[in-house]
Amino acid sequence: MNEPLAESEAPQARNSALGEDALWHILYSLGRDNAHPDKHKCYWGLVLAVRDRMLEKWASVQRQYYENDDKRLYYLSLEFLPGKFLRENLLSLGLESEAHTFLRKYSFSLDQIMDVECEPGLGNGGLGRLASCYMDSMATLGLPAFGYGIRYSYGLFRQEIRNGRQVEMPDNWLHEGNHWLIPRPHGLYPIRFYGTVHEWQDDDGTLRHDWRGGDIVMAMANDMYVPGYRNGHVNCIRLWEARPHKEFVLSSFNAGDYIGSVQEKIKDENISMVLYPSDDAPEGKTLRLKQQYFFVAATMRDLVRRFKKLNKPWDQLPEKNVVQLNETHPSIAIPELMRILLDEELICWEDSWFICQKLFAYTNHTILPEALETWPVELMERLLPRHMQIIYEINRRFLEDVRLHFRDEPDLPSRVSLISDGPEKVVRMSHLAIVGSFSINGVSALHTQILRDRVFHDFIRIFPDRFNNKTNGITPRRWLRQCNVSLSWLLSEHLGCDWVTDLDQLERIRELADDEEFRHDWEQCRLTNKKRLADHIEKRNGITVNPHSIFDVQAKRFHEYKRQLLNVLHIISLYNHLRKNPEVMMQPRTFIFGGKAAPSYWMAKDIIYLINCVARRINSDPHTRNVLKVIFLANYNISLSQLLVPATDVSEQISTAGYEASGTGNMKFALNGALTIGTRDGANIEIGERVGQDNIYLFGLCEQEVLDMRNRGYDPWELYKNDGELREVLDMINSDEFTPGNPTAFSGIFNSLLSGGDRFMVLADYRAYAETHQRIAHEFGDRELWIRKSILNTAGMGFFSSDRAVREYMDDIWGVKPDV
Ligand SMILES: *Cc1c(COP(=O)(O)O)cnc(C)c1O
C-alpha cells in the first residue's frame, strides 16, 4: 500500500495562503478557469488546499509511528458517520479565518459553500456516529489509531416524505466524486469466498489446512483523513471497496460472451455497493456476511503486513497492536486471524489462540434479543468453510474447559456454546466475540449492569475479569464548537478556548448561572439558533413556527423501543385538551420529529405516517395553530442534527427502560443546553447524576419495574378502560380521524398497544409522561428558572466528551499511548 517509507524525507511545509492554493487547484487539479470562481469551484478548490495540508501532516505522523515503534489501535466498524468534512477540517487545522478571507473575496459564506458538500451516510445512526466521534478524539489525543470500514457506493437511503409516508431514495453520495477520500488502486488484496479446505501434513507430521479455490474479490483501500484538533496530528480511516478480481472473465469473453463477462465483474463489485439500512436488527443476508468478512479480511492483511515490517516474533503481535470490534459485525476477524496464524504462518493452535485472545476487544451496543447477531452454520460452511472449522474447534476447546470448571452445571455448556441448536444451527457471534476477546464492554453503567445480570450472565462467571463499562461520549468539536457557534463564543469569552479539548472546564460556568447578564446572553444565543431552525422549517416544510415556543425535539432512528409513539399520543391529547378548552392559556409548543425507519420495518413506517397525519391535522386547525405545531423534518442526518441540537429546548429521550444501551443523541442536546425529558435508561441516568436531578425530567418505569410489571402480567386494556383521556386518543387512532375515509390506517399500531400486549410499555408510561410535560410547560414559562437549568445542563456535561471515553479505553483496554 502507498504509505510513506520511514526513510523518506519530510516534504517542505507549505507557506502559501490557503486561498492562493485553492485558486491554484481550481486551475491545475480541476482543470477549470479560476478567474471568477463560483461556489462549486470555491468549494472544490478549498477542499484540495485543505487536503494538501492534512496529507503533509498525515505522512509525517505515519513515519513517526514506525520510528517510535508505537503500539497501534485498529478500530473496526462496519459503519462510520463522519458528517460533512470541510468545516470540521478547517476548524481542526486552524484554517477557518483563512477560508473566510478567501470566500469573502468572492462573496460567499462558509455556510453557502457547505451546501455543495455531500454528507457521507456510511452508517445507520448511533453506532456509526460513535465510531466517528471516537476517531476524532483519538486524533485529538494523538493516538496511533486506524479506523477500518467499507466504502459503500450507496450510503443510507435518502428519506423523502410523500403523502405523509417515508419513501426511500438512493444516496449516490459519490456521483460528483469526493476529494476527501483518496483511492489507493495499487497493492490490492485478494479476498476469498467459498472454495474448499485441503488437509496436508507438515514435516513434523502435524495436520495442516489450506483453503483453496472459490471466488476471489479484490479489496481496494480508500483513505479518509481525520485531523486532531490543532495538534498537528492526522489519522486515517481506511474504507475498503470491492473490485473485480480480473477485469473480464477471459474465457467467457473469448467465447463471445462479452456481456456475461461484464456481469461477473459487476457481481464482485456488489459487495461494497450498499449499506444495510437496518438499525438494531440484522438482516441475515449472504451479502451482509460477505461484507463483514471482506472488510475484516482486508484489514487483518493490513495489520499483519505492517507487523511483519517490524521483524518481531509473533507473540509480540498483541504487544504492538490491539483491535477494537465495534459490535459483533467484525467478529469474524477472530477466526480469520486464527486462520492466518495456523494455516499461513504454521503456528500451533495454542500459540495462535493465545495471540488472538490478547489482541481483540469487543464493544456490545445492544441487548435487544432480536439484534444479537447469528449466522446459519450452513451458510458459514459454504461461504467460509475454513472459518467454520476453526469456530467449531474454538468451541470444542472452550466447552471442554467449561465442563471441567463447572462440573455440577450440565446445562451451562449448551447455554454458552458458540453454536446454538435450534431448528437451524447458528453461530452466535456475540459468544464468539466474548470467547475470543480479552475485554468486553457495555456503553453505559446501566447497560453494562444488564449485560452482567442478564444477557451475558453465564460468561461473567467464566470470564469475570473481561467485562467492563465505557460510557459513550460525543466530540465537543462537532457537537458544540462547530454546530453552536454563538454559544461557543459566549463560552470562550468567559472560559478561554481550552474547553474545546478539556470539556470539564464547562463546570466553571456553573457559577455564572446566577449572573443575570450571562443568562441574558445565554438566552440570546439560544434564540439565534431557534430562529435559524425556524427559517429552515419555513423553507423545508412551508410552516411558520414561533421561535419563542418550546422547541421539543425527538430526532433519532424510528424504533418501537424509542417510543416516538408515546410522544405522538401525548401530542394528540394536548390537541384534544386545547379544542375542548379554547379559553385556556397554554405555553406554545412546537414538536419536531426527525428520523428514518428501516425500509422493511412496517410498524416504524406506520408511526412516521401517523406523525405526519397528526401534524397535517393540527397545523391546519385555526383554533390551535398559535400554540401547537407538529413538524416532521425529512432525512434526518448529521447535518440536520447539527441544526436541531443547538435549537432544542426539550430533548426527548423516552425509550422503554432497559432498551437503549446508552444513546448519544441525549448527550448532544444536553451539552447544548437542552433539558431532557427521559426515562431512567442508558446514559440518561448518568446525565441526571452529572447535571443534577433538578435539571432533568426523568419519569416512568425503571428497568426493574418494567421486568416486574411484565412478570406480574401487564394488561394494557386496564389502562385503556381506566384513563379516559388516553382512551380518547387511542380511539381516534383507531378511527378515520387523521386519515379521512380510511379508519384502519393505524389499526396495526392500535393492536400492538392493546391486544398485542404493548411490548414497549407505552401505555404504562403514558400518564407519568403527560404529567412531566405539564411540569415542563410550567417551568419553561419561568424564564430565569429555565435558563438557569439550561446553563447547568451544559456545565455538567463535560464527562460526556468522547475525549474522556477514549482515554478510558486507552488506559483500561488498549494500552496505547499518545504520540504527539
Ligand atoms: C447522534 C445521532 C444518532 C444517535 O441518536 P440516538 O438518539 O442516541 O439514537 C443517530 N443519527 C444521527 C444522525 C445522529 O447524529
Image (cartoon, helix red, strand yellow):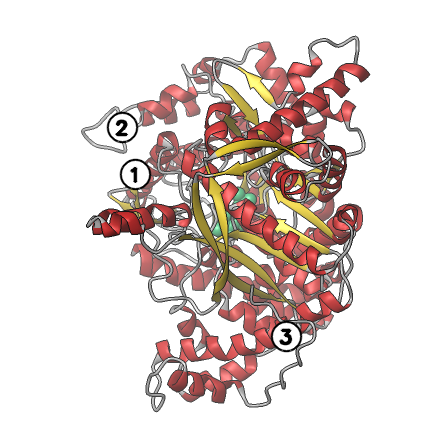
- The quarter holding residue 514 reads bottom right
Please identify the residue farthest to the front as the structure is shown. Answer: 203
Seen at 54% across and 34% down, the residue is 655
For marks 1 and 2, give the CA distance.
10 Å
Seen at 75% across and 10% down, the residue is 409
| Residue 696 or residue 464, whichever sits in front | 464
On the image, numbered disc 1 is attached to which residue? 613
| Residue 688 or residue 439, whichever sits in front | 439
Residue flagged by tag 1: what amino acid is it?
Cys
| Residue 23 or residue 721, whichever sits in front | 23
Where 62 sits versus 441, above or below?
below
For marks 1 and 3, give the CA distance.
52 Å
On the image, numbered disc 2 is attached to which residue? 745
Residue 5 image position (x, y, % from top left)? 65, 71
For marks 3 and 2, give the CA distance.
57 Å
Residue 516 image position (x, y, % from top left)? 67, 65
First along the sequence among labels 1 and 2: 1
Residue 288 image position (x, y, % from top left)? 44, 38
Seen at 42% across and 34% down, the residue is 286
First along the sequence among labels 3 and 2: 3
Residue flagged by tag 2: what amino acid is it?
Ala
On the image, numbered disc 3 is attached to which residue? 57
